[in-house]
Amino acid sequence: MNNHDMTERELSRRQFLAGLSTAAKGSLIVLSLPAILTACRQATEQTSDASATADAVAQYSLLSNELATELDAISARIVPTDDTPGAREAGSVRFMDIVLAQGRQDQLETLQTGVTELNARTNTEYGVALFSALTEAQQDALLTAIEASPFFSTVRFLTVASLFALPQYGGTGPDVGYTLIGMTHAHAYMPPFGYYDADYTARGE
């Protein structure tokens, strides 16, 4: 790697760290970098262990499958999958499960309540029981309406944090952390992280 590549990579890493700090605004959970890296490594290990068994469906420590499904749908709109891996490929919900299981029962209740209220709003506006069953456009509309809430802010921070890890640090998914820090794709160089943060940053909030 030449000096130019090293400089660009370090710049990308600093920009990502700055964006991580921005994403923490309003979140009920804020993690240190060592805590993020540890949770990323644990998430990878749990996924690998589950994949090695006959029953490859990974069980969560704290989240119910129903809650995990809805959080997965939300995180997939915060960092969507396009020409690069997104939150879903990164296993962001498993990262959330690990973080919440570390004595954060109050925050878990906030996420449970937030999902319940989001599903109620989904039913009122679209006649559908679950947020995860909506189209992406419908999901975007509902999340935009609640983006200032502590619930959404917390899910956004955990989603972005879950992507922070080089593979050698135990990243949560296949090269997702490398993509974001190693500047492989332009949309990951700096905030915004996904559609909502683009709008959030444009308003100067």
Image (cartoon, rainbow, N blue to C red):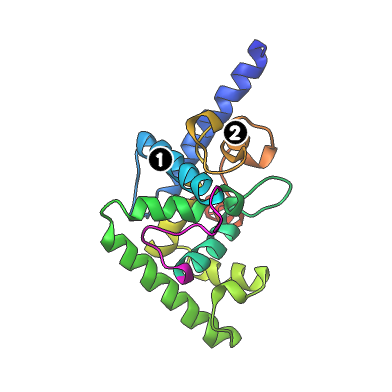
Separation of marks 2 and 1 at Cα, in angstroms: 15 Å
**Residue 68 placed where, x, y %?**
48, 64
Q: Is residue 61 left or right of residue 68?
A: left
Secondary structure mostly taken by the magenta-highlighted segment of the chain: loop
Identity of the residue drawn at 31% across and 67% down: 109
157, above or below 114, in the image: above
Task: Give the camera-side residue of 100 and 45.
Answer: 45
Indicate yes or no whether the magenta region holds residue 59: yes
- Tell which residue pokes out farthest to the top in this image: 3
Q: Secondary structure at mark 1?
A: helix
Task: Give the camera-side residue of 44 and 116.
Answer: 44
Q: Earlier in the sequence, mark 2 or mark 1?
A: 1
**Quarter of the image holding residue 1?**
top right
**Residue 84 placed where, x, y %?**
69, 45
Which residue position holds label 1?
A: 36
**Residue 16 placed where, x, y %?**
52, 36
Q: Three-letter amino acid code at disc 2?
A: Tyr
Res 149 visible:
no
Which residue position holds label 2?
A: 178
Identity of the residue drawn at 48% across and 31% down: 169
Q: Is residue 10 left or right of residue 154?
A: right
Mark number displayed over residue 188: none
**Residue 63 placed where, x, y %?**
40, 63
Q: Classify mark 1: residues with Cα within 10 Å, few (<14), some (14-19) or many (20+).
A: many
The magenta stretch is 52-66
Q: Is residue 109 left or right of residue 44?
A: left
Identity of the residue drawn at 38% across and 70% down: 112
Res 146 visible:
yes
Q: Three-letter amino acid code at disc 1?
A: Ile
Task: Give the camera-side residue of 110 and 175.
Answer: 175
Q: Secondary structure at mark 2?
A: helix
Q: Classify mark 2: residues with Cα within 10 Å, few (<14), some (14-19) or many (20+).
A: some
